[in-house]
Image (cartoon, rainbow, N blue to C red):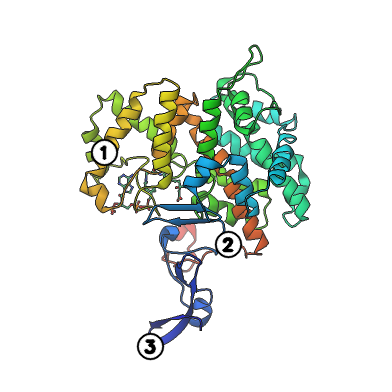
Amino acid sequence: MSKIAKLHINGSQYELPIVEGTEQETAVDISNLRSQSGIITLDKGFKNTGSTKSAITFLNGEKGILRYRGYTIEDLSEKSSFLEVSYLLIYGELPSSNELANFSNEIRSHTLVHEDVKSILDGFPSRAHPMGVLSSLVSSLTAFYPKSLDPNRSIEEINGTIIRLIAKLPTLAAWSYKNRMRQPIMYPKNHLDYTSNFLYMMFGLPTVETEINPIIAKALDKLLILHADHEQNCSASTVRIVGSSHASLYASISAGIAALWGPLHGGANQAVIEMLEEIKNQGGDVEKFINKAKDKSDSFRLMGFGHRVYKNFDPRAKIIKKAADDVLSQLGINDPILDLAMKLEEVALNDDYFKSRGLYPNVDFYSGIIYRALGIPTDMFTVMFALGRLPGWIAQWKEARENSEPIGRPRQVYIGHNHRAYKNISDR
Ligand code: SDX
């Protein structure tokens, strides 16, 4: 017997089905509310509104749980690899060794991008932020693969687009960095693994032999796993809603990159380091900045703190914090910014303002410290987030297409002028 919710409004009663997920999450399905009653719901920022049913990622914000297709982030970040996690998110199951080998080889053979991409890249000034360059270059892929414009083509062709995107994003990301540095671009070396190839294209120079430190490559692989998906966050919702108009996967991912760029979302990892450097440059007075963050008249926020879903520790932050410690000690780096971050966390977590609001460090609070240690420049941090989030975005886009979800088109409550007659300019 399916459960129902009863809504009483203006003397009428409406019955709405209750939906329950496999982790006992419960929702009131309001799909027919307006047709029954003419009434809609309102929920700014969709803080309490589910946009879909999804089988990809499960979060429990109160318990700090994060699972990709049922596997915990703790297990996957410890035992898996980024390409294996990408396969899991996109196709729903962990691959066999043959499936993983085929997937990896497919990706290796598509890492090059069309030579004409270089002339698009050359059009950007060196001060262009790599996220803006990356979003544009991903969108430009539709020009080189026009068949990808139709998202309703065969599974094989959709898969080809998926493989190309996973293969080429590191190349485009590294080239965005080279454009920033006004250095010559580096072509991929396909004997290298996924993260080593990216690091080679980022830091390699045509004039010297480039050795990739396996500690750095492994740390980066773990970071990419930790960023791979996070259910219906701002950028994933953007990818789904752009894809819902049957725009191509490249166009949808380009939009997702743009959404991730914002400092309240993926751009926070860059903002955290800039905030910590500001605190350090002003003498390291942590209390002063904690008070600024609590002061409603001050627009300053503690970047890397707080989360829409996690009202307890973000499980990724815990893993990244330990990884930051490990990577810095393995590389023999003593970064005062890490010490400052730990001091800031300690003071904030003992302050009732943060505790009472469930404001804990999120995925972005410590990730920038590792990126710094890996030699990645600050304005490339969010590009790193995009590299990690790509398989999640692809999985979300693919799931929505496979479920034939309708075009996303929210309603509104109009609060503007009522009808009024046009006035000629001479009468205004
Ligand atoms: C990501 O959604 C995802 O899953 C995202 C992500 C992913 O993997 O895709 O996890 C990645 O985007 C992580 C978040 C990165 N952003 C930041 O670190 C920016 C700083 N954090 C905040 O701006 C904020 O916490 C958000 C945007 C993350 C969440 O904002 P919400 O859920 O809209 O919460 P809110 O702004 O309504 O805040 C609730 C209260 C408010 O105070 P009161 O009105 O109750 O007095 O908490 C306060 C806020 O002022 N608050 C903060 C704060 N975050 C919230 N106060 C100071 N510093 C902060 N960082």
Residue 256, percent across and down?
56, 47
Kindly identify which residue carries mark 3. 11
Q: Going by the image, does 382 lie left or right of 276?
A: right
Which residue corresponds to the image point at 46% horizontal and 83% vertical from the top-left?
15
Q: Which of the labelled discs sits on residue 135, or is there none?
A: none
Left or right of residue 145, residue 222 in this image = left
The residue type indicated by label 1 comes to Glu
Mark 1 and mark 3 lie on one chain; the one further toward the N terminus is: 3
The quadrant holding residue 335 is top left
The residue identified by callout 1 is 346
| SS label for mark 2 | loop
Q: Residue at x 53, y 74 (%)?
A: 31
Cα–Cα span, label 1 and label 2: 42 Å
Looking at the image, which residue is at 63% across and 58% down?
A: 399
Q: Whole-percent x and y of residue 33? A: 49, 77
Instruction: Determine whether the residue tagged by mark 3 lies in a helix, strand or loop.
Output: loop
Q: Which kind of residue does numbered mark 3 sit on?
A: Gly
| Residue 428 appears in the rendering | no
Q: Is residue 383 above or below residue 38?
A: above
User: Quadrant of the image for the C terminus?
Assistant: bottom left
Residue labelled with disc 2: 408
Q: Residue at 43% across / 53% down in the picture?
A: 65
Q: CA distance from mark 1 to mark 3?
A: 53 Å
Of residues 383 and 125, the one drawn nearer to the viewer in this rendering: 383
Which of the pair 412/48 is nearer the observer?
Answer: 48
- Please report contact status of discs 1 and 2: CB closer than 8 Å, yes or no: no
